[in-house]
Every structure is written in structure tokens, then in C-alpha cells.
Amino acid sequence: MIEKKSMLLTVAMIGLALIFIPSVLFNNAIQKYFRFVDSWSVATIRPSRQARLPETHYRGLRRDEPPQPELRFVKFSVKLAEAKKVKVAADFNKWDPNSLELVKTGVNIWESIVPLPPGVYRYLYNIDGQNILDPMNPDTDIDSGRKVSLLTVK
């Protein structure tokens, strides 16, 4: 009986050694491999300017939910023959025509849908590098000495 007990104890020790030694080696290898992470420096991200969020409204009856801004989906659409690129430059995208490019959806029809909170917006279409007024919108305004199309989102 003692021989059997010592044999089982020897087998158990060998089994533990076979499990324990590779796991220690693997752990050491992982620690050496990821040691470079400690030398990374972390940058602080700060906003370049203050952002103004749209006015918020409670939706539904629950007051414990955070308020969400009311958004409307506005469709910018223009029909142009022989245009290669159509973009929108507006006050809601800081007059950057590269931030909103329209997609050709049909024969000479360019469209894009943009979520906007209610308000009054000024915009121009940028067609192949030239700014033009919206031919389908008669509402215009003057912005920085230039005539622009005017959009009212309710």
C-alpha cells in the first residue's frame, strides 16, 4: 500500500512540474515582451475650442433619462448635369466643403441626408470647386459679404 501511495505522489509531483514550469516560463516571456509598454508616454487631449451643444428636450415621460437634442433629418438634393463632385459648405460644418459630400443617386441627382437640430442655417453647394446657391431654394441671406442659401429647420 505504501508503494502505491508513493507512486501516486511521484506521479502527482511530475504532473505539477509539467504544468507549473511551462506556465512560469510563459509568464516570464509575456512580461518581457510587454515591458516596452511602461516606456510609452501618454498625451493629454484637450479641445481646441468650446463646443456649443444644441438645446435638449425630454422625450417621453421618464425624467430620469438624460435629455437628448431634437434632431431633424434634412435632405440636401440637387439636380446637376455633368457634375463630377458635389459638396455642401455650411455654417453647421464650419464652411468646410470637404466634410459633407453628396452622393450621386440617379441620373444627374446628388443627395445626402444630414441630422440637424432645429434652427436657421446658411449653406452653399460646392460643385467641382465652385460655390453656387441652391437652385431649388429661393430663400437667401448675406453671410460675410456673400449671398448664401438659407435653410430653416423646424
Image: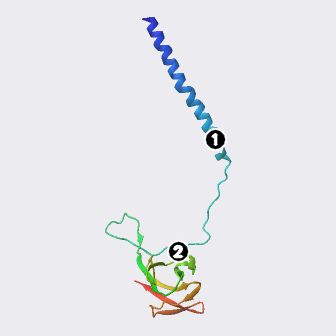
- Residue that badge 2 annotates: 52
x, y percent for residue 75: 42, 80
Residue 82 at least partly seen: yes
Give the farthest residue toward the left: 61
| C-alpha distance separating marks 2 and 1 | 45 Å
The residue depicted at 46 percent of the width and 6 percent of the height is 3
- Of 2 and 11, which appears nearest the observer? 11
Q: Nearer the viewer, mark 2 or mark 1?
A: 1
State yes or no: discs 2 and 1 in contact (Cβ < 8 Å): no
Q: Amino acid at mark 1?
A: Tyr
Q: Quadrant of the N terminus?
A: top left
- Residue that badge 1 annotates: 33
x, y percent for residue 69: 43, 73
Quadrant housing residue 42: bottom right
Under tag 2, what secondary structure?
loop
Sort mark 2 into few (<14), some (14-19) or many (20+) by Cα contacts within 10 Å: few
In the rendered structure, the answer to whether residue 143 lies left or right of residue 120 reads right
Q: Amino acid at mark 2?
A: Arg
Residue 118 at least partly seen: no
Does 22 appear above or below 123?
A: above
Question: Which color scheme is applied?
Answer: rainbow
In the rendered structure, the answer to whether residue 44 lies left or right of residue 18 reads right
Name the disc covering residue 130, or none. Answer: none
Q: Quadrant of the C terminus?
A: bottom left
x, y percent for residue 121: 49, 84
The residue depicted at 41 percent of the width and 70 percent of the height is 68
Does 15 appear above or below 111?
A: above
